[in-house]
Image: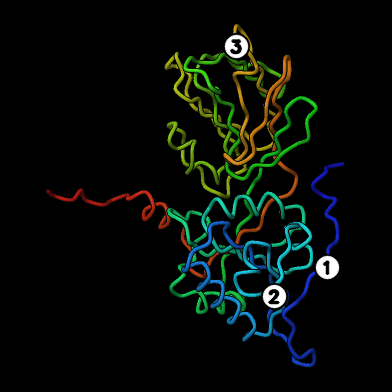
Amino acid sequence: MFFYLNCPRASFTLTKLDPHVSKSSAFKTIAIVGKPDVSDQLVQTLSELRACLIEHQCDVLFDKAAGPLVNEPGSDDLCALAEKSDLVIVVGGDGTLLHCAREIVPTNTPILGINLGRLGFLVDISPTNVCEVVSSVLAGHYEADDRTLLECQVGNQKPQLAMNDVVLQKWNVARMIEFETWINGSSIDSQRSDGIVISTPTGSTAYALSGGGPLLSPSLDAISLVPICPHTLSNRPIVVPGNTEIQIGVCGKTDPQEVRVSCDGQEMLELKSNEKVTIRKFDKPLRLLHPAGHDHYKVLRTKLGWGSHPKTL
């Protein structure tokens, strides 16, 4: 029933090795997805990664961003690319991984990230030791966790996915918007604010955190609702079970044309009159791989600067 599940088959050129050589790794065909912004560091990392995978007797596929940079053909169909692969390696920042995750999650293909971005909450392999860490992963030494995604539908429009968050926000106006929120059919409030962030545990370190939302462990089956600059300060963030269906509808004097819905800050959806936004957990999780010894709370300490002392002038 869900349109993401129909991934068209496409033909790819593989970097093949001797078919008589045995492969001990569970990851035999690996797809590489690159960030869209070309840089010398991206080209160097892709080249090192390609050489490492070939050395480990892997068949290698590329997306359209990564392939041409290493003189290989690339595909613009990430879903079909993932269907042909045992593992997808993303070379870029968290945004690149978010985009890739939304496309490949129906295929159940695990994903691994090499960080060429800024924070790197999700892509946690440093480009300085790519081959060492990837070799360890290929040998079976890695941590894995399943990440929840959200499915968002505006009225009868085509559903979209979000790994971090779904955000209802004001658009091209300086005033607040008014909307009502329902949880499993029960109205919980009507608020005037700049919008609301509906976040997964993965997204609790992103926009929701900036709005004063709680940090949720990735293993939690939960969804957080975080108001953005509410007029009434008693409108506080709340956390609901993961199987909750959330609906949001514009009300009062707010024109739906003044409101937009975004998924991971990358997909933007318009509202029409009387349309409601329905948000629920997607029925398939994303398998996210990390290097062996990965510690979620160490990541939080490092990225958020917990326990650090302010520098003296």
* Residue of label 1: 11
In the rendered image, the vertical position of residue 88 relative to residue 251, given as above or below? below
Badge 3 crowding class, 10 Å Cα cut-off, few under 14, some 14 to 19, many 20 or more, is some
In the rendered image, the vertical position of residue 104 relative to residue 70, given as above or below? above
* Residue of label 3: 254
The percent position of residue 84, horizontal first and vertical second, equals: 78, 67
In the rendered image, the vertical position of residue 271 relative to residue 76, given as above or below? above
- Disc 3 to disc 1, C-alpha distance: 49 Å
Question: Which of pointers 2 and 1 lies earlier in the amino acid sequence?
Answer: 1
Q: Residue at x 69, y 22 (%)?
A: 271
Query: Regarding mark 2 in the picture, which secondary structure is present there?
Result: strand
Tag nearer the camera, 3 or 1: 1
Q: Amino acid at mark 3?
A: Thr
The percent position of residue 311, horizontal first and vertical second, equals: 18, 51
Quarter residue 134 falls in: bottom right
Badge 2 crowding class, 10 Å Cα cut-off, few under 14, some 14 to 19, many 20 or more, is many
Badge 1 crowding class, 10 Å Cα cut-off, few under 14, some 14 to 19, many 20 or more, is few
The percent position of residue 120, horizontal first and vertical second, equals: 47, 56
In the rendered image, the vertical position of residue 13 relative to residue 262, given as above or below? below
Query: Regarding mark 3 in the picture, which secondary structure is present there?
Result: loop
- Disc 2 to disc 1, C-alpha distance: 13 Å
Tag nearer the camera, 2 or 1: 1
- Who is closer to the viewer here, 148 or 30? 30
Q: Amino acid at mark 2?
A: Val
Looking at the image, residue 297 sits to the left or right of residue 277; the answer is left
- Who is closer to the viewer here, 180 or 266? 266
Question: Which of pointers 3 and 2 lies earlier in the amino acid sequence?
Answer: 2
Q: Residue at x 53, y 22 (%)?
A: 172
* Residue of label 2: 60
